[in-house]
Every structure is written in structure tokens, then in C-alpha cells.
Amino acid sequence: MGRRGLGKEILGPGLGGVVGDTLFTPMTVVDHLTLPQLQQRIKKALAAYHAKQGLTAQEVAAIALHTSRWVCATVARYNREGLEALPDRRHDNRQS
């Protein structure tokens, strides 16, 4: 099975024009968020994810490269607000 065959088998012919070598070329991602904003939301979501799996604040902090205090605050906000807690709330990074 070559590279071309892999893409066509996995994706099939009717998935939004995504077939063949598309698996092996860079994808286009719409600019809903900047890369730093997306990274921050992912870190926050992963903090909640790991906490839900039973990891301690210190363990999550080591994974997220943040402090235990940040992890506790992030999980507390997530518990109160759900996904709405994930946007970056630092004053310099607010979207207008």
C-alpha cells in the first residue's frame, strides 16, 4: 500500500474533497484564533482533562508547564463556567 492508497482508503472520495496526498501536505486552518490563543485554550482544556482523569494539581502543572496555582484556578473556572472558561483572560490578549 503506497502513500496515495493510504489517503484514499482512509478518507474516501466524498469527504469535502480531501483525498490522496492531502494526508501528506500541510493543511489549511482558518484563523479563528492566533496560534498563542489556540495554545492557551488547549493548555486550559488539557488541565481540566488531566484533572478529570485523577491527576493532582502538581502532576497537571508539570505536564502543562504552569504552576499548581494556575492549574487550580483553571480547573475551578472550568468547573464554574465550562468551556466558556477557556478563552485567554489576560488583558493584553483580549480580542476586540
Image: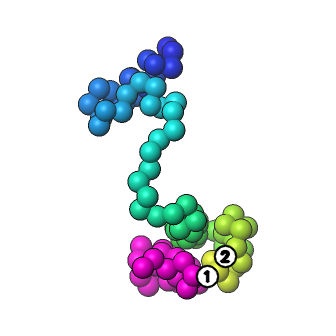
User: Over which residues does the magenta segment extend?
Assistant: 73-96
Q: Nearer the viewer, residue 69 or 22?
A: 22
Could you tell me how far apart the alpha carbons at marks 1 and 2 are, in whole angstroms?
A: 6 Å
Q: Circle 2: is it few (<14), some (14-19), or many (20+) Cα within 10 Å?
A: many
Q: Nearer the viewer, residue 28 or 48?
A: 28
Amino acid type of the residue that numbered disc 1 sits on in the rendered structure: Cys
The residue at which mark 1 appears reads as 72
Label located before the other in sequence (1 or 2): 2
State the SS at label 1: helix
Colour pattern of the rendering? rainbow
Q: Circle 1: is it few (<14), some (14-19), or many (20+) Cα within 10 Å?
A: some
The residue at which mark 2 appears reads as 57
Q: Position of residue 90 (x, y in %)?
A: 57, 83
Amino acid type of the residue that numbered disc 2 sits on in the rendered structure: Ala
Establish if 7 lies above or below 82: above
**Disc number for residue 84:** none
Which corner quadrant of the image does residue 53 belong to? bottom right
Residue drawn at x 52%, y 30% as measured from the top left: 24
Instruction: Evaluate if marks 1 and 2 touch, with contact meaning CB atoms under 8 Å apart.
Output: yes
Q: Nearer the viewer, residue 13 or 79?
A: 13
Asked if one can make out residue 53 in the rendered structure from this viewpoint, the answer is no
Residue drawn at x 71%, y 68% as measured from the top left: 65
Q: Position of residue 88 (x, y in %)?
A: 52, 76
Q: Is residue 9 left or right of residue 16?
A: right
Q: Position of residue 38 (x, y in %)?
A: 52, 63
Residue drawn at x 49%, y 14% as measured from the top left: 1
Q: Is residue 71 magenta?
A: no
Q: Position of residue 73 (x, y in %)?
A: 59, 84
Establish if 3 lies above or below 63: above
Which residue lies most toward the top here? 1
Asked if one can make out residue 67 in the rendered structure from this viewpoint, the answer is yes
Establish if 28 lies above or below 20: below
